[in-house]
Amino acid sequence: MARKILIVDDEPNIVISLEFLMKKEGFEVAVAGDGEEALAKAASFCPDLILLDVMMPKKSGFEVCEALRADPARAGLLIVMLTAKGRDTEVAKGLALGADAYVTKPFSTKDLLAKVKDMLAR
Amino acid sequence: MKAKHRFILAVVVLGLLMTGPFVVTSMLVWLDMKDAEREMLTGLLLSRLPVGTMMTIFGFAIGVVVLHKLFKQYVEGLLRMAETLRLMLSANRNFRVTAEGPPEVQQLARAANDLAQQRDALMDDVEAQIAKAKASVEEEKNRLAALMSELAQAVVVCNLDGRILLYNNRARLQFKALAQGPTSVSGGALIGLGRSIFSILEKNQVQHAQEVMRQRLSAGKTALANFITTTRGGQLLRIQMVPVLGAPGEGEAAMSGYVLTVENITRSIEQEAHRDQLLHTMTEGSRSALGNIRAAVTNLIDYPDMEPELRERFLRVIEEEVAKRSHSVDQTMAQFSDSMKTRWPLEDILGIDVIAAAQRRIEDKLKLPIKTEEMDDALWIKADSFSLVFALVFLASRLQDHYEPRELRFRLTSEGKLAYLDLIWAGPAMSSETFYTWEMESMQVAGETSPLTLRDVIDRHGGEIWYQREKAAHRAYFRFVLPVAVPEVSHDEERARGNGRPEYYDFDLFNFEDKSIDLDRKLSELTYTVFDTETTGLEPSNGDEIIQIGAARIVNNRLLRQEVFDQLVDPECPLKPESIPIHGITEDMVRGQPNIDVVLPAFHEFCEDTVLIAHNAAFDMRFLQLKEERTGIRFSQPVLDTLLLSAVVHPNQESHKLDVILERLGIHIDSRHNALEDSLATAEVFLKMVPLLEEKGIVTVRQALEASEKTYFARVKY
């Protein structure tokens, strides 16, 4: 059975690339454009892993991450935060809020793919 | 016993001497006589009594006249001489007793003068020795002072109570710029020797920093404290504080004060914030765009056989992101060059130095000969010399390209606060469009470029530039208008001396409410504001107004000539023509000056916590008092009057006019009847009087006030 990945980002220009890549690699993919949609899709789509952007309208990636981690039903959900902010303090915050990995833009899609596969295989 | 009482006693004794022996003898003879003899004598005497009485009265009168004459010459003359001798002893060494009166007194006077001469010779010798010893110390001090004043940082030294002991010119200028209200009026009133630093800086912050230093000192570390504070006007100051340590020796050197270096960082903080923002948009702002491009590119490379439609979309992503990035880089660059411009500090520089630099560069780079015409070589301008020279060279190169002039000429003149720097050439008329293009293009000269345009340079200087033709001479010039750096020119006008002003005694000087000044402190320890006013006339209650206030401070028995208050005041009424020769202030000078409503609060701030001194203070105080209701400002501190103090010190001198006192105390000043000059003269007088008052047992302010009051009442009786 194909593993499910939810891509959350408000920028269509990155979403299109990630969606294409993940589909090519055989994942089942869903997309959300903001934080609230992300929470809704997380409930309906039941993804195994979320690629979560930090800077988003309505709810930030940090808030989404916190909300997801507060839900015991989704304990096994993997969260990878994607962000354009490279400061150490923000990396620390993301990990403290329960993200499993933190990737700073611009990232290599190959590395990201390798990381996603590795995390899902564990 | 007073001289006058002694004189009356002498007259009585004289009367007794003239009549006493006769009366007593007559009494004795009378008692010895028989009745018949008495009768005969009475008959004889009564008929001749008028002659005897006349003779006695005549003799008595002559006696009184002689006595009076002797008294005048010996007693009063000697008293006067004693006073002048005291004067020679302390206040005015060069004063000499005038030999007058009877020969004996004259001889005494001459002997005293000779003694004084001898003493002077001795003292001169001693002084020369001391001066020699002091010279090296003085030189060291001067070197330190010169160093301080040359420092680009503002430096203030305070004692532990926050009283300012020392400051440099830079500090004065910096705090003057921070002063509230019209700065010309405040005149740097905030900063001054003996004033509290806490009127400028937050007390708690300074004390906290003091504590930090103390802790660091006791921990054996380098004592240093930094803090940033906000002034009343919202300016940001960065303060660095280091301790002044007492003489080492007994255990640890204790802190006896501190040195503050003050830097106004308001502008640099703003610029830093701006640059941070730019840096941020350049770095963090690029991350997501690059991420989008990178992902799209990788997909295109890794999956070369994707559908054309999808391929098209990835290419569009790349194109879009790259376009966005290019735009943002352009914008950042534009903003960055703006922030480069705001960082330009203008410095004071001699106009001819700028021209000399431009001349060298033009001759060097363009091989174009330069000549100079009329040059004001004492003209200072406010400029950023680098960009200004660049602009001049740029214009020269443009002229060379278009009109090939054989030579260029510079001219430097000024008009009021504006400096005119002209670049002149001979040649045909140029169109205004050409000049406009030159003005707006980025400047380039012989391989060097500047991000700025000529217009930018002009704007940064707050100046102007235009093109003008001299038709008769068949030539044209560019005129740079730049701000002149030293606008203040001192007016040394000769003034006719008037009769001074009358004395007023209708104002009760001795009622004051300000108890914060301790009246029982020594006269030499207090801080004073010595002031004088010039007015439209002599009748304050009849509509005469103040037109100038001048004041100086005395701190620690020293006159501070640099901490002065000097302000013309618009009286808002016409000046009286007859008063103009006295004060030398004309209509033109007062129009446009602040009125008394603005000046008085500033003057009040200047006087804060000081005892006021003026010559014939009643006059000046009356003017200030009449403005109380209108301005709500009260001068409630104690007031000393040098006129009354002079009367205390020299009760036997006839005149206590300022000119006369100056001469008597051997004080020479250049000009008078300007409020500031007169207040400085009054201050000198007061300083000379302090030791004279001390000789009379008048040491504290209270005693001085009481003694003045006595002469005051004494004068009122006459």
Image (cartoon, rainbow, N blue to C red):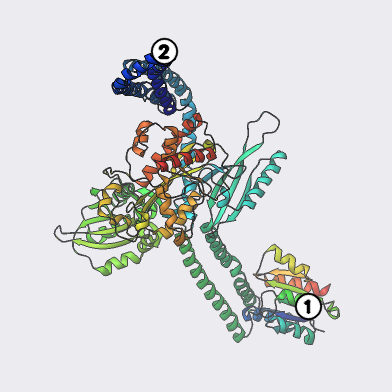
Q: Kindly identify the amino acid type of the residue bearing the numbered disc 2.
A: Met
Q: Kindly identify which residue carries mark 2.
A: B33
Q: Residues within 10 Å of mark 1 (few under 14, many from 20)?
A: few
Residue located at (33% from left, 42% from top): B672
Q: Kindly identify the amino acid type of the residue bearing the numbered disc 1.
A: Ala
Return the x and y of residue B706 as percentages of the image width and height: 51, 40
Image quarter in which the C terminus of chain B is found: top left
B708 relative to B372, above or below:
above
Check disc 2 and report its element: helix, strand or loop: loop
Q: Alpha carbon of mark 1 to alpha carbon of mark 2: how far?
A: 147 Å
Q: Quadrant of residue A31?
A: bottom right
Q: Residues within 10 Å of mark 2 (few under 14, many from 20)?
A: few
* Image mark 2: chain: B
Q: Is residue B490 left or right of residue B602?
A: left
Check disc 1 and report its element: helix, strand or loop: helix
- Depth check, front residue: B142 or B184: B184
Q: Is residue B505 visible?
A: yes
* Image mark 1: chain: A
